[in-house]
Amino acid sequence: MRNCIVAQSGGPTSVINASFLGVLDENNKLNYYDNVYAGLNGIEGILAKKIVNLSEIPYHELEGFKYTPASGLGSCRYKMKDFNTNEEEYKKLIEIFKEYEIEAFFYIGGNDSMDTVKSLSSYAKEHNIAIKFIGIPKTIDNDLMYTDHTPGFGSAAKFIATTVLECYLDSSVYSNNGIFIIEAMGRDAGWLTASSYLAKINGKPVADFIYLPEVAFSKEQFIKDVRNKFLEQNQVFIVASEGIRDAEGHFLGEQKSSAAHDKFGHAQLGGVCNTLKELIIENSITSRVKTLELGVTQRCAMHCASNTDIEEAYMVGKKALEYSNTDCSGDMVAIKRNSSCPYSSETFLIEASKVANNIKYFPTEWINKEGNNVTDAVTEYISPLIQGTPEIPLENGLPKFSVIKK
Amino acid sequence: MRNCIVAQSGGPTSVINASFLGVLDENNKLNYYDNVYAGLNGIEGILAKKIVNLSEIPYHELEGFKYTPASGLGSCRYKMKDFNTNEEEYKKLIEIFKEYEIEAFFYIGGNDSMDTVKSLSSYAKEHNIAIKFIGIPKTIDNDLMYTDHTPGFGSAAKFIATTVLECYLDSSVYSNNGIFIIEAMGRDAGWLTASSYLAKINGKPVADFIYLPEVAFSKEQFIKDVRNKFLEQNQVFIVASEGIRDAEGHFLGEQKSSAAHDKFGHAQLGGVCNTLKELIIENSITSRVKTLELGVTQRCAMHCASNTDIEEAYMVGKKALEYSNTDCSGDMVAIKRNSSCPYSSETFLIEASKVANNIKYFPTEWINKEGNNVTDAVTEYISPLIQGTPEIPLENGLPKFSVIKK
């Protein structure tokens, strides 16, 4: 028997399941493996032998995963220890793989998952174990190196830009509108927040200010900017990343300015948008401030997904299966953009070690000189990634999503 | 010249613009009036003569409003004073209407707007002024009496149910998932929150508990319920209305339990979901609690609107124009449901005075006996209202929305 296994790790995205379906579908076509297994809850689940055989599940129960958000195979945030100091886990995992006659392991994830792919493949090579370890990229954050972009980002960017557009209209209906602040994810990199620049009415971006983690946040400049804009327009629309921090590197959303935060010690209770709201009110710009924390919706809003993103997530899964039949291991499937207009892309392999523990920041040259917005370059980069409306199966007017029976 | 005027008031909805377009389109068909004017920012704007002539705006600039969320004509929260004690405003308004040769005024709004319709029509009748005042219903809250439901509710319900479904999947990916709390709007009535019951996987609602303003909230029962469910499932999914209050009538979201709230005195800073989170953590059920306040997205997410809702919002606008050619004034266009399956509805007129300052609560008989969820009856009622996917015009992958040039 020749079998393979696929698993998911880290934070979910809207399109992460399209990747595991890509692995399965391509194997159904090429028949490289007798069975495609799935590890539930990533490496952590595999170590606990939480394994199902996708090849034995009726296909009609699985095909819906192409349009089902969140990690359908379950996820984990489990970091393998270094095998030089702690070999036990590696031995156990290889044992389980041998038991299931696994020849290839596909791990769908971000930075940390690529670290796992790197470590496992190094361990296997060192011990002459003929199992291949291949990484499949996913993260809404778009912060993986070498790949032009990551599956998951396009759909999140589309949802953010759409929601920014809608909230801008909602926040503009009174003669006395005040200030609206939207908080997007992206602790280290500003890609998600920058996607709000694509929200335009008659060609003009609706966001007055866009704050990214890549720019040191100055409270003084923020107050000055917002005050001036409010005096000018009687309305200000702000999009801020959860990851913005000051010149000393302190996260703005974690500055525990109130007893409520101290009490629980949970920074997420406050959040960046409430800190900014506080600044605006404390500095008497206006008391009419509304906030919206997009929260997990930006990583699971399949109902607003980009079809281009879904198809690319599917493609990297299919390609991973194909690559596994070549002489490779310890690599991640990356995306190369051939052209933006018309958009076309292809895949290539990159060493997972180069991707692991690395962050692709938002480019400095795409940030305006004031550091409070982005430039038009972002439109050309992101726009192709948000195109296309998927045909999501519906049931009684709502999306019909799939789950693995456990 | 015979002219009419339309204006919008109160909180926006995704489909409120379809109603003013209905007025315009029906007049273009029937030619009752020479011009359809629009008052910008409701009564407040009309009093300031902020008036545009929709009939003179090229139609291609207006047709997009059928699929543009938020009050495209602007809104206000302006309550007319009683004309027996303060006649000035009434005189001024009638003067402006006469200047513009207005014969009918259409006011799109909720409870308060129907109060305005009632007052203006009474004043006009008392003074033998031949202007008709007709109300067009809108509110995501679905809390207007006599009408089976309100335009705006179906789209909000669809967005809420869809988002609940997606967030449920997102919150279920780890082996250790914790508790997820979603907060929906609806300060007085639980319709919006109850719509989360429609979010089902394989026929089973995903929300473990649904808390409505109609049921006195007991902290003790909540803690007991959530603790038991968490022990049973290692995961609890909760949907709560912003309007839940305890047996003494105190809003849960306004209980200023932290310095952060006291400081600004803004109850919305805290919110119900954070109060519930606090209860869960304080009572050591788990510290893994995530919250999501849907905020304004639920009233402006046109990208997830119900086509049935859009068409009904359009219909009540058209019908208002038709009714204005009959012997009526001081009435609101209401919706009568003829059948749920297949769904069909028609309109009728109801005195605005009966709708004004009245609230249609969520029916007690649709709440389960524990008071922590709703019954299947809600599915039959809401399901027809969320059907149909509108064909929203797109531009570069995002909705192409319209604005009135001022």
Image (cartoon, coloured by chain):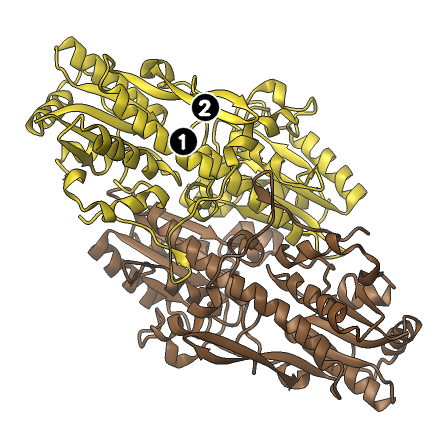
Chain colours: A yellow, B brown
Give the numbered dot on residue B255: none
Residue B149 vertical placement versus B275 (above, below)? below
Question: What is the x, y in percent for residue A84?
Answer: 18, 12
Give the numbered dot on residue A312: 1
* Residue B172 as seen in the image, left or right of residue B396: left
Q: Secondary structure at mark 2?
A: strand
Q: How many marks?
A: 2
Q: Secondary structure at mark 1?
A: helix
The answer to whether residue B398 is seen in the rendering is yes
Q: Residue A186 versus residue B53: which sits nearer the camera?
A: B53
Tell me the amino acid under the disc marked 2: Ser
Question: What is the x, y in percent for residue B202?
Answer: 27, 58
* Residue A141 as seen in the image, left or right of residue A208: left
In which quadrant of the rendered view does residue A48 lie?
top left
In which quadrant of the rendered view does residue A137 lie?
top left
Q: Residues within 10 Å of mark 2 (few under 14, many from 20)?
A: few
Q: Residues within 10 Å of mark 1 (few under 14, many from 20)?
A: many
Q: Quadrant of the N terminus of chain A?
A: top left
Residue at the spot 71% in from the left edge and 66% down from the top edge: B25
Marks 1 and 2, how far apart at CA: 9 Å
Q: Earlier in the sequence, mark 1 or mark 2?
A: 1
Tell me the amino acid under the disc marked 1: Glu
In which quadrant of the rendered view does residue B336 lie?
bottom right
- The answer to whether marks 1 and 2 sit on the same chain is yes
Q: Residue A342 versus residue B203: which sits nearer the camera?
A: A342
- Residue corresponding to mark 2: A345
Question: What is the x, y in percent for residue A393?
Answer: 37, 52
Read off the chain for label 1. Answer: A
The answer to whether residue A116 is seen in the rendering is no
Question: What is the x, y in percent for residue B225?
Answer: 28, 64
**Contact between labelled residues 2 and 1, with CB atoms less than 8 Å apart:** yes
Q: Residue B361 versus residue B145: which sits nearer the camera?
A: B145
